[in-house]
């Protein structure tokens, strides 16, 4: 047993991120109103510095901290850099929105940083309690962020729904933890795998425990039938927070699930084969329901909520086929997460920019966007193509890679369902595109001219949003054409998890 | 010593009562109380398991009690947040009845 204080310096990025968050909170007290934009820059530069520090300090490290509670390995490093980079993009995207539409800007960035800390620890944790605390750090920050538009009824409602469903799901997850603990007496992932493999006659209590832990996690990634909260929360939350929910919290939950399944389930091969069927059914239902219900949506945020449910289904299909012998499925899931996040960043950046100009969020409001804002329209169009999975964008390579892995592991029917549901997805993504490029400009609310009622539409999007849009679109095409460098990094990451 | 299974039964019953409360209550505050009940059911389960396993050789750790303490702390923070949101709701809409909080559906 190693003393608890060994190798503490490996957690430097986490300590520094905590410090950065407190620094932002403290600076907020002293900055006069109107200068709060500085806080966003402090956060962005802090995050960039942290990316560099993590890469320099933790490259090629393979350590277990606190007697096996936290892992410092290539997998954790990969997700750390991913989450920090995503945080930078989200802050860039929210700057204008926060400045014009929200009060108390300093806390917004502080909470965002705390939630990134939670995500980082989630990707590192190898023990149920640690994972739970990290998960709660993330979701508590998100509860507050969802409620951030204090005077908006919709924001209140979304926060209330989120907090109730979130609290119930973590209670379910904890009950699962307590059942696993009372039968096996352990909470570390690898000990759970040993316990599962050794028990010749697995007691029902253990089944219930593991099942409830999974139910709790399925709530967090909004898999059907635990998805009902997602569309409401997404619609009501402020726009940047919706983007953050769709990208960040989902990616973090999948990072945790990947580690939990690969370290806690897959080594117990016999049991994992039984659970694979459960995952396969969940994945099928999630893909189909997410994509089918999205067909009927009129609100852009709700459409993206259902689309993110559908994508969670694809990712679950990847989780289903995780195995001890091949790293193809885990590579596929990670690649999908990166591609999906970048694509969604582009789509949301374009929609936030549109919302900043008009304050509208219905699909029909997008009519004629290509005439007023060609750049926004082009980026949004590329993002939608990528979400639908069309070639030369990240969406195609990520789906190709993941579905190949699914089919390779013998789940041909699951790959078939996945391809069928992405065909359904094509319809509603292209429907939005039709709205942008073909439909005429709608008449204004007061019957006047659309452009006169929304004069901002004639102006250029702000530089921060253009930065995100341009770099996101470039990354999307790069990943669609030449994904090799990223795949190399992902392979190194998933080797760290392979038994 | 009372058998472990009775504690587990108690905890399961409390958990289910809490879940029922979440689904059937109309007032947001009472829903939050029901969630607390669920979390405390978890605590009973953990502490009973930890103290029963003590000395059997198989389980020589205090993880159960530790997790329970963490859960109590987190639950307190959770209630704080939930009540703040409910308060906001009451200021804006003068109601905490969840049936009337129905701006967004489907």
Image: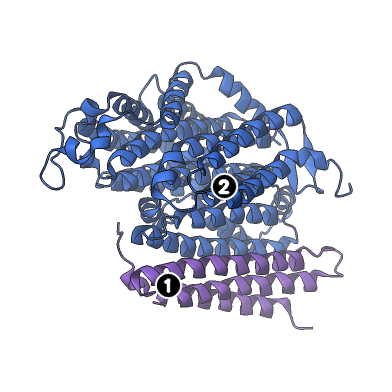
Relative horizontal placement of residue A405, taking residue A361 as reference (left or right)? right
Measured as percent of width and height from the top left, residue A126 is found at 70, 47
Relative horizontal placement of residue A232, taking residue A135 as reference (left or right)? left
Q: A391 or A155, which is in the foreground?
A: A155
Q: According to the image, label 2 marks what residue?
A: A31
Give the letter of the blue chain. Answer: A
Residue at the spot 61% in from the left edge and 57% down from the top edge: A210
Residue found at the far left of this picture: A447
Q: How many marks?
A: 2
Q: Secondary structure at mark 1?
A: helix
Which chain letter matches label 1?
B
Which chain letter matches label 2?
A
Instruction: Name the image quarter holding residue A421.
Output: top left
Relative horizontal placement of residue A182, taking residue A431 as reference (left or right)? right
When the figure is inspected, residue A203 is found, relative to residue A489, above or below; the finding is below
When the figure is inspected, residue A390 is found, relative to residue A84, above or below; the finding is above
Instruction: Name the image quarter holding residue A157.
Output: bottom left
Q: Is residue A359 visible?
A: yes
Give residue B23's mark: 1
Give residue A66's mark: none
Give the letter of the purple chain. Answer: B
């Amino acid at each position: 047993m190693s003393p608890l204080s060994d190798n503490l310096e490996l957690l430097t990025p986490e300590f520094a991120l905590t410090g950065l968050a407190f620094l932002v909170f403290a600076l907020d007290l002293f900055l006069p109103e109107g200068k709060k934009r500085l806080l966003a820059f402090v956060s962005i530069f802090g995050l960039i510095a942290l990316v560099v520090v993590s890469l320099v300090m933790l490259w090629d490290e393979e350590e277990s901290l606190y007697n096996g509670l936290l892992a410092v390995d290539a997998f954790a490093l990969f997700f750390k850099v991913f989450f920090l980079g995503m945080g930078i993009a989200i802050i860039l995207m929210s700057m204008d929105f926060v400045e014009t539409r929200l009060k108390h800007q300093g806390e917004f960035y502080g909470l965002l940083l705390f939630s990134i800390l939670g995500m980082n620890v989630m990707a590192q944790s190898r023990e149920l309690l640690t994972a739970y605390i990290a998960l709660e750090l993330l979701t508590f920050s998100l509860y507050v962020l969802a409620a951030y538009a204090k005077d908006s009824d919709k924001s209140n409602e979304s926060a209330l729904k989120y907090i109730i469903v979130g609290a119930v799901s973590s209670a379910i997850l904890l009950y699962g933890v307590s059942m696993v603990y009372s039968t096996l007496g352990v909470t570390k992932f690898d000990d759970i795998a040993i316990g599962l493999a050794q028990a010749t006659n697995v007691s029902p209590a253990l089944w219930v425990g593991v099942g409830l832990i999974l139910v709790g996690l399925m709530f967090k990634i909004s898999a059907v039938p635990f998805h009902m909260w997602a569309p409401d929360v997404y619609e009501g939350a402020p726009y940047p927070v919706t983007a953050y929910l769709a990208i960040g919290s989902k990616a973090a939950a999948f990072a945790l699930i990947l580690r939990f399944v690969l370290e806690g389930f897959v080594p117990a091969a016999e049991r994992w084969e039984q659970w694979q069927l459960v995952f396969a059914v969940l994945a099928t239902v999630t893909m189909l329901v997410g994509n089918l219900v999205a067909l009927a949506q009129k609100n852009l945020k709700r459409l993206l909520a259902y689309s993110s449910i559908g994508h969670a289904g694809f990712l679950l299909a990847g989780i289903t086929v995780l195995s001890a012998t091949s790293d193809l499925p885990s590579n596929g899931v990670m690649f999908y997460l990166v591609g999906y996040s970048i694509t969604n960043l582009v789509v949301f950046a374009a929609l936030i920019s549109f919302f900043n100009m008009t304050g509208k969020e219905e699909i029909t409001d997008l009519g004629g966007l290509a005439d007023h804002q060609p750049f926004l329209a082009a980026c949004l169009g590329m993002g939608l193509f990528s979400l639908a999975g069309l070639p030369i964008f990240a969406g195609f390579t990520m789906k190709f890679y993941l579905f190949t892995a699914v089919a390779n592991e013998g789940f041909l029917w699951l790959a078939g369902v996945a391809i069928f549901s992405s065909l359904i997805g094509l319809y509603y993504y292209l429907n939005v595109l039709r709205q942008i490029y073909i439909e005429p400009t709608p008449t204004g609310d007061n019957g006047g001219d659309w452009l006169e009622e929304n004069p901002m539409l004639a102006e250029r999007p702000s530089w921060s949003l253009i930065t995100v849009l341009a770099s996101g679109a470039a990354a999307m095409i790069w990943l669609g054409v030449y994904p090799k460098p990223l795949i190399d990094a992902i392979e190194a990451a998933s080797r760290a998890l392979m038994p | 010593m009372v058998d472990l299974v009775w504690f587990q039964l108690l905890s399961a019953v409390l958990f289910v009562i809490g879940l029922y409360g979440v689904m059937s209550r109309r007032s947001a505050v009472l829903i939050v109380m029901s969630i607390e009940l669920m979390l405390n059911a978890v605590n009973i389960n953990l502490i009973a398991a930890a103290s029963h396993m003590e000395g059997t050789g198989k389980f020589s750790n205090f993880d159960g009690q530790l997790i329970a303490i963490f859960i109590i702390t987190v639950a307190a923070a959770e209630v704080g947040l939930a009540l703040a949101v409910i308060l906001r709701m009451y200021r804006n809409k003068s109601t905490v009845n969840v049936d009337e909080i129905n701006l967004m559906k489907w």
